[in-house]
Amino acid sequence: MAILCLADNLNNLKKRLSRIIVAYTYNNKPIFASDLKAVGAMAVLLKDALKPNLVQSIEGVPAFIHGGPFANIAHGTNSLISTKIALKLADYVVTEAGFGYELGAEKFFNIVCRTGNLKPDAVVVLVSIKALKRHGNGDVKKGISNLEKHLENISLYGVPLIVAINHFVDDTDEEMKIVEDFCKSKDIPVAVADVCDQGGEGGIELAGKLVSLIHNNSSKFHYLYDINAPVKEKIETIAKKMYGADRVVYTVTAEQDVKLCEELGLDKLPICIAKTQFSLTDDSKRLGRPKGFKITVREIKFSAGAGFLVPMTGKITTMPGLPAKPISENIDIDDKGNIYGLY
């Protein structure tokens, strides 16, 4: 999925597929997909998947739905192809960078923008009262510290920002005012997006303020780290500046991986840290804005095809979990060919 979303044409896709490391020799030399002569077959399987899907909302707004790499284990945004096509067709293009700013947006800026030579004009930080309550143990005011950290993170990239409060029917006026007053105290524009109840009409205020922000402020976008810096330096820059960690510790396996990626010439790739989306730390139970914590790197996976290194932190896994009772348990077929449980 990450390879598909970072390729900008068929030839580039094939180059990325050829770089996939599928195994190692007994001498610890990488075996690439190209060595197995598998690139052509994989490209044929993906030739139609490479084409973006043009859809429309129930209000007739055009949108590309293309790709879905998770931001906790990959780079977390739609395909580069769909973004570039959209930029040619529309005056304004909005794309989603999944999960918190320290995950999706960091990776969008340092991986996707670097790969696609994109320059964002503005950032919309989507906030919900429910999320702030969770980070404040039921108290919106306490949860504001989490939002504050995300806003500080954005300032490191030189891109203008606006806070959008995603309003739901259970949110009270008092709770909304807490967030609005906080943003105003920081001289940050804020708008209420009541799209859940009002659809597109509920986003008019946000759209107007966003357009005004873009035209009245110049983006001075820059990357967080030098791509040529040592692997550990890049990891620690992200951990300390984006997460607020005091330090990064590495297991013996991770230390060996750092040396190996240097030997393989992969050390100049950008970093895509795999981390829980529920916390600024690598512990999903530490909410709010924790301080005085460390980030533990267990190992580093080489996503050579996608073009980035993936330090695995905490207890994060790359395989999405199933529910206690997956839907597949209800699916069956009888001796007459009738299928049950699909719908």
Image (cartoon, rainbow, N blue to C red):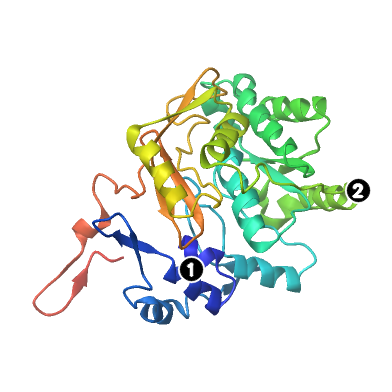
Task: Find out whether the residues at labels 2 and 1 contact each other: C-beta distance under 8 Å.
Answer: no
Q: Position of residue 51 (x, y in %)?
A: 54, 77
In the displayed structure, does residue 41 sit left or right of residue 210? left
Q: Position of residue 255 (x, y in %)?
A: 39, 36
Residue 133 image-quadrant placement = top right
The answer to whether residue 93 shows anywhere in this view is yes
In the displayed structure, does residue 296 sit left or right of residue 330? right
Numbered disc in front, either 2 or 1: 1
Q: Quadrant of the N terminus?
A: bottom left
Q: Which secondary structure, mark 1?
A: helix
Q: Position of residue 247 (x, y in %)?
A: 52, 24
The mark found on residue 16 in the picture is 1
Q: Name the foreground residue: 182 vs 155.
A: 155
Amino acid at dot 1: Arg
Picture residue at 77% right of the left edge, 26% below the top: 181
Picture residue at 81% right of the left edge, 24% below the top: 185
Q: Which secondary structure, mark 2?
A: helix
Q: Which residue is mark 2?
A: 216
Amino acid at dot 2: Asn
Residue at the extreme left of the image, as rendered: 335
Q: Position of residue 304 (x, y in %)?
A: 45, 59
Picture residue at 29% right of the left edge, 46% below the top: 323
